[in-house]
Image (cartoon, rainbow, N blue to C red):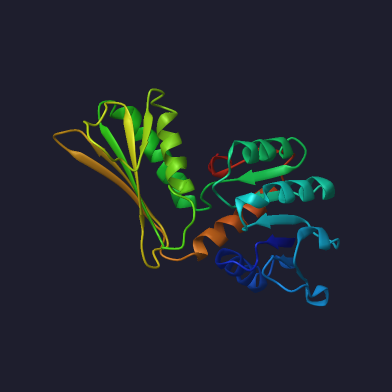
């Protein structure tokens, strides 16, 4: 599979490019990043529109503000696309959903299969423990832009799917008691922390904690590549980690 990597100059983009270059099944069709000086002979481009060569897949690890460019390019070329960025607003999510009507599109706020399993476990616990207080703590490196993390929202949304009355309290502050239906979401930014997500279910007499720790960024690149392999055989539509888990 020939893969275009958009955002190839960032930390995750570089990790993904290294993984593809070491693969026996896949090749890099193009590396694209606003940080690059264009060098078409070596497959390096500053913007997606500059690349018109052969490709089978587009993986985006750039920034959510590129959503229009990414979806437009995928539609123009009829390419399946894996969007591995987070922080999209409502308008950008609408672009993603619209594009998925015409091309296979994979979107996830976290490319880790482990997080997908954590999300499933969170739903089971939330449903089985309807009176528990739920708190989510997420930790990331000090350069991360979106707060709270897309993964924390993904987990909160999973819980809300079985607790429809839930309300998010992001970065709790001020004076007053905790409300019965709230899900507290707390963000820590420090050092080189790759990513930790912890969900606490407190019932007064006992506490259950579900936790996922990312030990290196390679797992997200591996997840994006697995998503691309899955997407390659799909019809037009919207897919996510639940699609892979079945």
Residue placed at 37% from the left, 67% from the top?
A: 191
Q: Is residue 1 visible?
A: no
33 relative to 112 in the view: left or right: right
Measured as percent of width and height from the top left, residue 103 is found at: 76, 42
Extreme-left residue of the structure: 205
Measured as percent of width and height from the top left, residue 206 is found at: 17, 38
Exactly how many numbered labels are in the figure? 0
Q: Nearer the viewer, residue 194 or 144?
A: 144
243 relative to 105 in the view: left or right: left
Q: Quadrant of the C terminus?
A: top right
Q: Nearer the viewer, residue 87 or 159?
A: 87
Measured as percent of width and height from the top left, residue 195 is found at: 41, 58
In the displayed structure, would residue 200 be above or below residue 1?
above
Q: Quadrant of the N terminus?
A: bottom right
Residue placed at 61% from the left, 72% from the top?
A: 18
Residue placed at 74% from the left, 50% from the top?
A: 69
64 relative to 153 in the view: left or right: right
Q: In the figure, residue 17 lies in which quadrant?
A: bottom right
Measured as percent of width and height from the top left, residue 21 is found at: 67, 72
Extreme-top residue of the structure: 165
Q: Is residue 127 visible?
A: yes
In the displayed structure, would residue 31 be above or below residue 196?
below
């Amino acid at each position: 599979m020939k893969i275009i990597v958009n955002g190839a100059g960032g930390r995750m983009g570089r990790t993904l490019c290294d993984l593809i270059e070491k693969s026996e099944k896949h090749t890099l069709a193009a590396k694209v990043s606003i940080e690059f000086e264009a060098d078409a002979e070596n497959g390096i481009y500053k913007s997606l529109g500059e690349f018109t060569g052969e490709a089978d897949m587009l993986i985006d690890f750039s920034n959510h503000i590129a959503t229009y460019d990414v979806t437009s390019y995928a539609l123009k070329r009829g390419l399946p696309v894996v969007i591995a960025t987070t922080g999209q607003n409502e308008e950008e999510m609408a672009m993603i959903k619209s594009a998925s009507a015409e091309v296979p599109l994979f979107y996830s706020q976290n490319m880790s299969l482990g997080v997908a399993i954590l999300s499933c476990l969170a739903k089971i616990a939330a449903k089985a423990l309807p009176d528990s207080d739920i708190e989510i703590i997420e930790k990331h490196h000090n350069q991360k832009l979106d707060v709270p993390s897309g993964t924390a929202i993904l987990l909160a949304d999973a819980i809300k799917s079985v607790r429809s009355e839930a309300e998010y309290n992001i970065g709790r502050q001020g004076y007053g008691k905790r409300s019965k239906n709230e899900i507290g979401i707390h963000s820590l930014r420090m050092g080189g922390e790759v990513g930790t997500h912890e969900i606490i279910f407190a019932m007064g007499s006992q506490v259950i904690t579900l936790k996922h720790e990312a030990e290196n960024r390679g797992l997200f690149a591996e997840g994006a590549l697995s998503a691309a392999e899955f997407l390659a055989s799909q019809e037009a539509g919207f897919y996510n980690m639940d699609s892979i888990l079945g």
